[in-house]
Amino acid sequence: MLQGVIAGLFLALLSLPRNITAGNLTCVCEHTDCEKNLICSGKLCFVSRHQEDREIIHKKGCLKADSELCWGSFTEKYGMKCCWSNMCNRNLAIQLPGESNQSEESPSLKNLLLMILVPLFAILVLAALVGLFVWKVVQSRQRQMLFGSDELEDMDFMLKASIAGDSTLENLLNDDCTTGSGSGLPFLVQRTVARQISLVECVGKGRYGEVWRGTWHGENVAVKIFSSRDEQSWFRETEIYNTVLLRHDNILGFIASDMTSRNSSTQLWLITHYHEHGSLYDYLQCTPLDVESCLRLATSIICGLVHLHVEIFGTQGKPAIAHRDLKSRNILVKNNKQCCIADLGLAVMHSQSSDYLDIGNNPRVGTKRYMAPEVLDEQIRMDCFESFKQTDIWAFGLVLWEIARRTVINGIVEDYKPPFFDMVPIDPSFDDMKKVVCVDQQTPTIPNRLYSDLTLSALAKIMKECWFQSPTARLTALRIKKTLKKLSNSFNKPKQHS
Ligand code: ADP
Ligand code: MG
């Protein structure tokens, strides 16, 4: 009897939920058909989730009657749970098989992205820091190469004292005691000289900076102040002047180079001899020439160019140098009416003996008007030093043409004009020049009157041989120098020959 009562009670307990379903339950309602209060009433509460395409749809609500699905299995796409007490589905959760992966997928995707991006970012920051460090080291090396180590700073005071007083630039530059390993003054002397200069007037504005007349102990000097965007030209000129024996009558005389920091900006100076006539371009504007001075100018330029182009072997030697921006604005006229070549900011060096070609890393390019056809059509062989010399020869031919036009023959002379003045606009583009020089294969027109003079006819012949389209067919600087020297000799001693 007791057993019967206990069994009855147990069964009653087990069936309790089913009994509850008999009444109406209040459940949480979350789906499109729910009323505003988000509550519904029914026989049982449920939660369900199912997947449509990629979207997972959650529902909570009431059922009016028992559903098999309450007891049924979960599928990949659908799952449902039921409960039988008021609001029992509020915290009821459900997971579809395979959904656990999906639900973890977004955090794990996030984690994965973090795992990739964070180290990547760290690597980039590290690389930037290393790059900055390397750049700083290279800069300080460059500075040290040019100016020696800072330990020498103490000597500055002593030098200032010794450089002051009666010394002239001439004896400073010729003094054996002060001559350093390169061709110029020791670096500290350069710096000291630079800082004793007073700037007087601006005498030229190039594409990349300004040239000033300055004075040092009462003597004129030229100070080229580089704009910071042309740092590489300053570095190149300084490097070439300091590593190479370049003292030559027809190369602009180098005195000093200096880099100073003022108000967090860097000032780059290159100090050279000052030539009051200015550039050959300036000079030709207002000076008609006689045949003798024409020849003198031309010969002096080619002598300078030969000195650049030739490699000199031995301890006092020099590598071969190609200028790459030869033009009348980069040639200066000295008081003795000889020229000297200036502006080595684009020059390249080559040594056959030690087998190196140093083309520097200057982003600057030469002057379009003076570019040889192989430069304009980008066919130049950059790995071959000879090609650079051949482009100098093309440009030399153009300078010769500028000089020849200003030479009076039988009382006739032309106005100054730049090469190709009648074929391209004032500031020709690369394509303008390419069309004229490469496509149409034009060269400047040689005035007929030149042929009425023996010397000028010879110059005309040289010009044409500088302007062959094929770079290898052009004359060499040495060949031109020999021809011009011969012409000068016959010109100086006409009576002996006639
Ligand atoms: P950039 O590199 O800016 O072209 P340059 O060295 O060619 O600089 O000089 C620009 C101009 O300044 C020249 O065309 C010339 O008129 C003048 N100039 C340069 N150096 C001297 C100098 N040593 N003496 C007198 N004038 C100079
Ligand atoms: Mg120049």
Image (tube, helix red, strand yellow):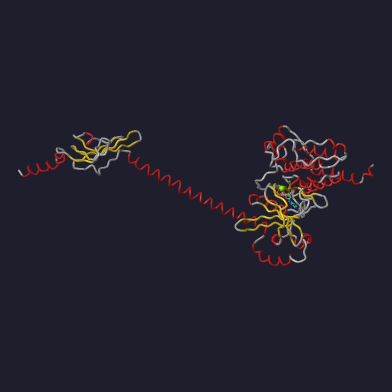
Does 8 appear above or below 135? above
State the image coordinates of residue 222 (x, y, percent, origin top left).
73, 55
Q: Quadrant of the N terminus?
A: top left
177 and 263: which is toward the camera: 263
Q: Residue lying furthest left in this view? A: 1
Q: Is residue 33 visible?
A: yes
Q: How many marks?
A: 0
User: What residue sits 79% from the left and 44% below the top?
Assistant: 477
Q: Indicate the quadrant where residue 41 lies.
A: top left
Q: Position of residue 230 (x, y in %)?
A: 65, 50
Residue 242 in sight: no
x, y percent for residue 390: 75, 41
At x 66% / y 50%, what residue is drawn?
232
Q: Residue at x 65, y 46 (%)?
A: 363
Q: Picture coordinates of residue 336 (x, y %)?
A: 83, 52
Q: Is residue 392 left or right of residue 266?
A: right
- The correct choice, above or below, for 217 with respect to 358 in the image is below
Q: Nearer the viewer, residue 189 or 306?
A: 189
Image side of residue 105 versus residue 161, left or right: left
- Quarter of the rendering occupied by the C terminus: top right
Q: Nearer the viewer, residue 65 or 461?
A: 461
For residue 158, which quarter of the picture?
A: bottom right
Left or right: where 359 falls relative to 30: right
Above or below residue 53? Residue 358 is: below
